Image: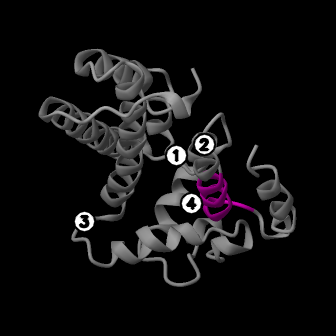
Amino acid sequence: MHPAAIPTPRWTTGAILAAAALFGFAVLTNIATVLNNAYDSGATFYDSTIFQTIIWRSGLALKLPRSFGGRSFLHIHLSPINYLPNALSYLMPVDRMTWFGLTYGILDGLLLLAVFACLYSLFGARVLLTFAGTMLFYCSGLITVGQFEPHQPLTDKFLERGRFPYRYRVIGTKLWIASRQPPEQLPAFAGLLETTQRP
């Protein structure tokens, strides 16, 4: 059956509660994993150090930590999407590590909501089956492994083009471009968007 032919069922109260529970579960487990890694095992010195720093009060330059030279992250990747969590971080009364866990926890939660919505339609609005399928996706590795080193390339995989309707392919491609791309590659993205044209 073509994806466009799958009917979209109405969301019941049970479906809304299940989706909310999955979202909260993803947020809380990500925060717990990030904080445990940071304060028990010690935070890594690689991508997670970079990403937790640029989304936490790093100014318009999205400055890297001093251990990485303190330069702007924009010298490495054109990444305007990081301005949103960076701007919000000035309003949040939490520390840098907690904000890092919360931000990527919200992204994981949104990913689970998207999977839940797809499965809810595919499974004919059967809430328990949809919940179980979404939990299997959670345990498959994209989220559970990613929580130990949260960083943007993991979101790139989700945003890559797949067998989705045209409008979703265009939105996904634009978000992928905005998320983490070297500035010298930008001319090539015009061609990439051309590949998302209507069938």
Which mark is drawn over residue 165?
A: 2
User: Which label lies toward us, 2 or 4?
Assistant: 2
Quarter of the figure with residue 113:
top left
Q: For mark 4, what is the residue?
A: 50
Q: Position of residue 63 (x, y in %)?
A: 57, 76
Image quadrant where one finds the C terminus: top right
Quarter of the figure with residue 170:
bottom right
Which mark is drawn over residue 44?
A: 1
Q: Which badge, 2 or 3, is on the more N-terminal residue?
A: 3
Please give the name of the residue rendered at 64% of the width and 48% of the height, measured from the top-left corner: 166
Q: CA distance from mark 2 to mark 4?
A: 34 Å
Q: How many marks?
A: 4
Image quadrant where one finds the N terminus: top right
Q: Secondary structure at mark 1?
A: loop
Q: CA distance from mark 4 to mark 3?
A: 18 Å
- Which of these two is toward me, 123 or 145? 123
Q: Secondary structure at mark 3?
A: loop
User: Which label lies toward us, 2 or 3?
Assistant: 2
Q: Amino acid at mark 2?
A: Pro
Q: Which badge, 2 or 4, is on the more N-terminal residue?
A: 4
Magenta span? 170-181
Q: Which badge, 4 or 3, is on the more N-terminal residue?
A: 4
Considering every residue shown, the one lying at the far bottom of the view is 60
Q: Position of residue 20 (x, y in %)?
A: 21, 40
- Which of these two is toward me, 47 or 184? 184
Q: Amino acid at mark 1?
A: Thr
